[in-house]
Image (spheres, rainbow, N blue to C red):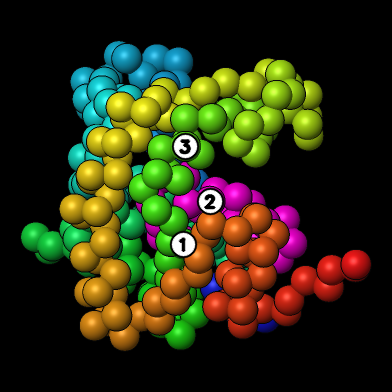
Amino acid sequence: MHKQAVILYGPPGAGKGTQAELLARRYGFVHFDGGRVIEAIVHAPGAEKSSVLRRQRALFDSGKMCDPEWFLGTVKEMSARIAGSGSSVVFSGAFRTDFEVFGGNGRKGLLETLIKLYGKKNVHVVMLSIPPKDSIHRNSLRKVCTVCGLQQLPGSKHPRCLFCDGPMRVRSLDSPSVIKERLKVYHAKAVPILTKLKRHGVRVVTVRGTSAPYKVFQGVLKALKLPPLQLKK
């Protein structure tokens, strides 16, 4: 299998992180969770000493986008490291503004970087589509493990992670008010990028994200032309 760069698009709660984790576990992709990476950076011990990181933290915690130039530099550097290791990569929570994707003012965007690293035919975009009410419902109930970062399914009542037994927490950006702000940002900024990606010759496939995660995963595999799961009845 050729090494691939897969970008999962979709509103908050569409299941980007879940699908990325499934690709990572079943097919060896490196999961680049933009939200998790940024959260770790801006909330790291000592981050408050940096005026740049204090600003990014304030933006992140309010549901707004971090400064595109700062985000672009961070993601490009990490992408080069992943490609250099010979690994495929799947992005969730990245590619949010025109500048980040296509660049500008003399700076290359993430798309050009990934095409250089992986080849255009190996860069794929999968759009997970769910209605706004599902975004709010899913995110409001979501908890993530403080140790391994895995998410519980919405509505789960287990107080600890079923994988590593770590304590669970609600992310700062998953309050209903922040989710609504994130939805506004997503529709205003991210959705038009999909049209532009198609004009650049990048293959964009839409997969319904309202089914059970394993069923959505089957749709993702079909979109990426990967071997389907053999499910026993």
**Up-down: is 89 above or below 135?**
below
Q: Nearer the viewer, residue 24 or 12?
A: 12
The numbered disc on residue 137 is 3
Say if the magenta span includes residue 7.
Answer: yes
Q: Are marks 2 and 1 in contact (CB under 8 Å)?
A: yes
Q: Residue furthest right?
A: 233
Secondary structure at badge 1 equals strand
The x, y position of residue 78, in whole percent, is: 45, 51
Segment colored magenta = 6-30
The x, y position of residue 95, in whole percent, is: 33, 57
> Marks 3 and 1: which is nearer the front?
3
Say if the magenta span includes residue 108.
Answer: no
Q: How many marks?
A: 3
Q: Nearer the viewer, residue 159 or 107?
A: 159
Which numbered disc, 3 or 2, marks the residue that appears first in the sequence? Answer: 2
Residue type, mark 1 in image: Leu
Residue 56 seen in the current view = no
Residue type, mark 2 in image: Gly
Q: Are marks 3 and 2 in contact (CB under 8 Å)?
A: no
Secondary structure at badge 3 equals helix
- Location of residue 230 by image quarter: bottom right
Marks 3 and 2 sit apart, C-alpha to C-alpha, by: 12 Å
